[in-house]
Image: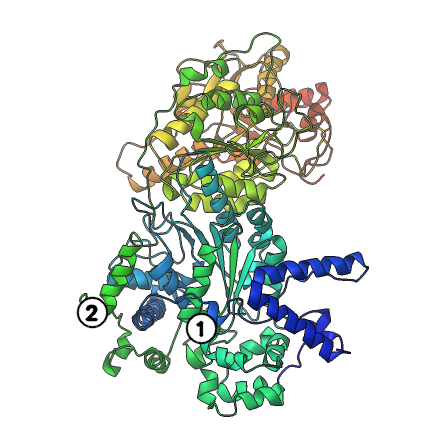
Amino acid sequence: MSAQPDKNLAAGPAAAAQDTDAQETREWLDALTAVINAEGPDRAHYLLEQLLEEARQHGADMPFSANTGYVNTIEPDQEERCPGNIEIEERLRAYMRWNAMAMVVKANRHNPADGGDLGGHIGSFASLAHMFGAGFNHFWHAESKDHGGDCIYIQGHVAPGVYARAYLEGRLTEEQLLHFRQEVDGKGLSSYPHPKLMPEFWQFPTVSMGLGPLMAIYQARFLKYLHARGIANTENRKVWVFCGDGEMDEVESLGAIGLAARENLDNLVFVINCNLQRLDGPVRGNGKIIQELEGEFRGAGWNVIKLLWGSNWDPLLARDKDGALRKIMMETPDGDYQAFKANDGAYVRKHFFGRDPKTLEMVAKMSDEDIWNLKRGGHDPQKVYAAYAAAVKHKGQPTVLLIKTVKGFGMGKVGEGKNTVHQTKKLTDEDIKAFRDRFNIPVPDSELPKIPFYKPADDTPEMQYLHERRKALGGYLPHRRTKADESFTVPSLETFKAVLEPTAEGREISTTQAYVRFLTQLLRDQALGPRVVPILVDEARTFGMEGLFRQVGIYNPAGQQYTPVDKDQVMYYREDKAGQILQEGINEAGGMASWIAAATSYSTSNRIMVPFYVYYSMFGFQRIGDLAWAAGDMQARGFLLGGTSGRTTLNGEGLQHEDGHSHILAGTIPNCVSYDPTFAHEVAVIMQHGLKRMVEKQENVFYYLTLLNENYAMPGLQAGTEEQIIKGMYLLQDAPAVAGQPTVNLLGSGTILRESIAAKALLATDWGVAAKVWSCPSFNELARDGADAERHNLLHPTDAPKVPFIAQQLAGHAGPVVASTDYMRSYADQVRAYLPKGTGFKVLGTDGFGRSDFRSKLREHFEVNRHYIVVAALKALAEDGVLPLATVAEAIQKYGIKADKINPLYA
């Protein structure tokens, strides 16, 4: 039995009110119609706004409604006609549907000995094939001499349909289709859009749902930024974003739509495939997701175009003089709409049109088949074309197209409109035959068991049309540029001399200040300076970067239309249409999305840009880890700077601010090169080397550096240590060899390296132990090098064994090793396996929740201060038989260490 209409789905409070004077109502409506006919809809809109405001002034409750009726936004007589051959396009779409289905089904008919199913999706592409057809045939420009190329964020689950099109175009081979989701041997096609795996094909990874919409908004904004700064002409480029209606529940999907409207991103088009289903069932069974999204987007300031009904609904709506059909359309919940398409025409007649005698009479002369063939708007090529045409011509606002479709369109009883369609990847021979018949694919019955791919001959009208359309739009899509055509020479290390030299007495600085000095110097480079993109999330003064406000300005497409409160100051808050800084406000995800847009500009815009995104390190990888992983997939190039890093440096802030694990998270991303430098010269060496790799060599890596807010003297660069800094370890302070004197090696990074330096002095004066201090800017790089050497030795057993770099460095330096950092113990502990054989190893780290206090108290609490380092060193020597264990106990007592206090991991 059909569900009862939800009264909350009515068109607003007026729908429930009783009309006490029908004649007066008619007169008002006739007057409105007359204005529209005589003076146009803009004049009518103005008059209605004036009437509403007047009503409010007189105390009438006139709440804003962002919703319109449950009908198409564009009237039939306002539609721009499609100039293409719709019949040929329909045939091409049918072939793509077939090949996409065949690809997935074949991938799941493997022998179980191969490891079982490979998965894949048929239903998603089936629902939006018409939308892709319109875009590929008429709207989406490839990069060419006269056009920078449109950016297309493709729904991840529709990848088989994109491959099917590329196969017809001759860009993919049948062998590649046969290796769908079989990538290890290098022949296959990735499951979803992955630039890392198909670097010349996919541009944007989107299947981690929600990231595509967010990244696309900032991509559209970055294109405007490039144009405003005169770096690239992007005024004719569009960013198209395909999302599912279920995907819009991801907070990232809607999180930045306000920015898009605020900055008038009319180069942005969202296409939301409203098939009313998410992965397991209805998106809004009791409600109307299209109405909900309309309110969200229009309320945020977007241009909203709804496409709900196909052309064969137009005559019915034209006859709907009293609004009975529109009323049923509005009152029917999405769960019922899904049920209609999971059944047949007779069911629709009874449970939809049968809700009102007037609507039932409308379809009295229509057969059940006619009723079943009433299409949703997303399956009508003319309607889709008209919606796209309206979107690309709209100025001053971003546009969202809410297009209603059927998930699994054309899949028949096996999946069309059913809750299980998303997981449907296997079809029986009978299902395949029905699919063949539905779309009239020229494959004989005898061949059906093989599920052959179908490709017309090159000289057929369909194939000629396919290539002609793409030729007219500049080439084939999707396509990804792997390197920019332009090149730059990175300033020499000597250019940053001020950061490399020792600090003068009494002029202590932090590594954050060192970074700012490096960045300021880089901005002065005439060639590369304009390509620097400083990105902030409302913490410029925290990181000492407010001087850049005046120097390079903050990008704002509207300029600065107010007088800043600090105008009389040297470093006042200056916004500018051509500003260089991207100031994202309190918005780490937005900052990261901007960074990704800039970090991939070499690919999307053929312009090398160098983004520097600085943020509280605690609000980095753990908050935007999914975006950081996507950045790795996209082959991003740029710098991420985790400021006020470490668990014990940010005194006074507490648990949610103190970072002790971002380097562990950074180490999980294969092309993220991460460092925890202690000194200014290390920052300069690492960043200049990073520029060489990413800008000069165009290597697909990005850098993560943690920075400190603690001021201290900087020792300056030791000539000859540059390469060792990059590899992750160099000898900072040696200890003269004295016969019979115990020796240890103290390793450290970040702020805790200075505790190791202090521990060296205590070991010498209190215990007669010589300590060598090693700066280890990257335990992650040391671990990767060690793992690489270990793998080589495993697979090349007869070759001379490779020696890990950390073992090379420690060779000839006797004694156990104590590694101490401001990060969890596992950060430094990952190098344990790569030390010289038999080396004792102790690790100190800051496991547990952070808390607020002075730095000295925090380091005592987390057991990483100089006293704990001394005790660890003595214990390691005792385990080697060099010192008695009683010495360790004596040191614990001497330094007042509370041996029985709760482990900070559990405190």
Can residue 881 be seen in the rendering of this structure?
no
Q: Amino acid at mark 2?
A: Thr
Q: Amino acid at mark 1?
A: Gly
Mark 1 is surrounded, within 10 Å at the Cα level, by few (under 14), some (14 to 19) or many (20 or more) other residues, namely many
Identified at 64% across, 73% down, the residue is 30
Check the image and report above or below for 491 versus 3. Answer: above
Identified at 55% across, 60% down, the residue is 304
- Give the total number of marks visible in the rendering: 2
The residue at the far top in this view is 505
Check the image and report above or below for 560 versus 319. Answer: above
Check the image and report above or below for 314 versus 705. Answer: below
Quadrant assignment, res 603: top left
Could you say where residue 836 lies in the image, as x and y percent from the top left? 42, 28
351 or 437, nearer to the observer: 351
224 or 560, nearer to the observer: 560
Quadrant assignment, res 69: bottom right
The residue mark sitting in front, 1 or 2, is 2
The residue indicated by pointer 1 is: 408
Q: CA distance from mark 1 to mark 2?
A: 29 Å
Could you say where residue 462 lies in the image, as x and y percent from the top left? 25, 68
393 or 575, nearer to the observer: 393
370 or 632, nearer to the observer: 370
Asked which colour scheme the image uses, the reply is rainbow
Could you say where residue 668 lies in the image, as x and y percent from the top left? 48, 42
Could you say where residue 269 lies in the image, as x and y percent from the top left? 48, 55
Can residue 250 be seen in the rendering of this structure?
yes
The residue indicated by pointer 2 is: 460
The residue at the far left in this view is 459
